[in-house]
């Protein structure tokens, strides 16, 4: 009997996306049914090709579906200044021999969810465009979604603008739809992702573990070598997989969350009503703290058992 939790990862790889995907596909408690791509860190062509490269590099037979190339209503905006032009430079991946499936992400996600005997968890770690399209195009899927565990937002300042975190800023209209969907949502925001770092000691241990660890060591040093010695690399997206696999690492609170879609300075701002000021019903579980040392140990325990 398969006791693994079935999930769909919606992603825009991206270096921390790549680490999250690795942790998920090699976890003993998670069954990745589909990887869906979205434009975000880099363009959809790059994010899709990166997802294909990762699946092939990891030796996993996981379908990859291509999703939206732009936000619902806005012009596309990328973060290549952080992730590089292709999103995953720093390691010489061979070009993938596998290809995307014929269905687009929304249709592919719908089929996986409706055909699953168990409820499926959605794990969006990029802009929420595909998830919003799924929930509005096929609202019947909500009945077979266990929860949405997403990386995005902040209860305070942003990282892309003073008000907004990148994933939410890029497509706030999509985020607003998701938070209004009445599906159970868990938020791994900058509150926890900004402190969920890998320090130099952890990264050096990765290097000598196996082929996967060495690959990430190379990419980490290519992208943010200076950050490693100045306090560590932030593993934003990896926190979602940690939450699924080891939720006791987190402190969390149920609260009302919404997203600003207008405002000269506040578009993409995440409203997190910890004090119940607006008298709105709670619609999300918001992670507020993470045990960083245990987070690093958890990640190393997954990676040390990889046999490639």
Image (cartoon, helix red, strand yellow):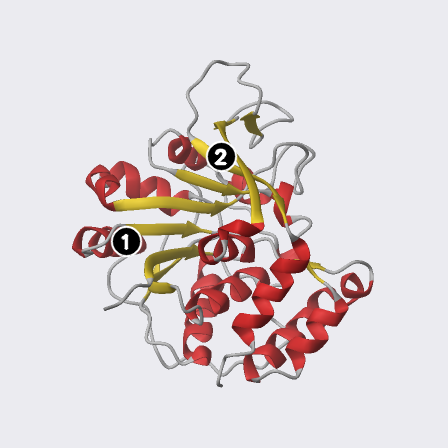
SS for callout 1? helix
Say which residue label 1 marks.
109
129 left or right of 226? Answer: left
The image quadrant of residue 158 is top right
Residue 172: mark:
2
Q: Quote the CA–CA distance across marks 1 and 2.
A: 21 Å
Q: Nearer the viewer, residue 265 or 225?
A: 225
Kind of element beneath mark 2:
helix
Q: Nearer the viewer, residue 228 or 6?
A: 6
Q: Residue at x 23, y 54 (%)?
A: 118
- Depicted 143 relative to depicted 100: above or below: above
Q: Residue at x 34, y 51 (%)?
A: 121
Circles 1 and 2: CB distance less than 8 Å? no
Residue 134: x %, y % from top left:
29, 44
Q: Position of residue 13 (x, y in %)?
A: 51, 61
* Figure quadrant of residue 272: top right
How packed mark 1 is, by other alpha carbons closer than 10 Å (few <14, some 14-19, many 20 or more), is: many
């Amino acid at each position: 009997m398969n006791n693994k939790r079935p999930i769909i990862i919606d992603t825009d790889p991206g270096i921390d996306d790549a680490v999250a995907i690795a942790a998920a596909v090699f976890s003993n408690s998670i069954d990745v049914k589909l990887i869906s791509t979205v434009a975000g860190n880099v363009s959809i062509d790059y994010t899709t090709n990166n997802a294909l490269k990762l699946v092939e590099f990891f030796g996993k037979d996981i379908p990859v579906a291509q999703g939206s190339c732009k936000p619902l209503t806005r012009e596309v905006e990328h973060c290549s200044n952080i992730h590089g032009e292709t999103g995953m430079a720093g390691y010489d991946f061979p070009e993938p021999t596998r290809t995307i499936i014929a269905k687009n992400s929304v249709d592919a996600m719908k089929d996986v969810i409706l055909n699953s005997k168990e409820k499926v968890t959605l794990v969006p770690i990029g802009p929420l465009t595909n998830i919003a399209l799924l929930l509005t195009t096929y609202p019947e899927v909500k009945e077979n979604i266990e929860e949405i565990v997403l990386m995005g937002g902040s209860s305070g300042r942003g990282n892309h603008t003073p008000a907004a975190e990148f994933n939410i800023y890029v497509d706030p209209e999509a985020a607003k739809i998701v938070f209004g969907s009445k599906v159970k949502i868990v938020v791994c925001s900058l509150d926890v992702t900004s402190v969920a770092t890998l320090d130099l000691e952890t990264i050096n241990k990765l290097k000598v573990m196996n082929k996967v660890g060495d690959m990430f060591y190379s990419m980490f040093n290519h992208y943010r070598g200076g950050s490693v010695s100045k306090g560590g690399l932030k593993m934003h997206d990896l926190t979602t997989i940690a939450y699924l696999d080891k939720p006791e690492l987190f402190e969390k609170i149920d609260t009302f969350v919404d997203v600003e879609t207008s405002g000269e300075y506040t578009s993409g701002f995440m409203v997190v009503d910890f004090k119940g000021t607006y008298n709105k019903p709670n619609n999300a579980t918001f992670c507020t703290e993470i045990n960083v040392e245990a987070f690093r140990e958890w990640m190393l325990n997954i990676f040390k058992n990889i046999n490639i």
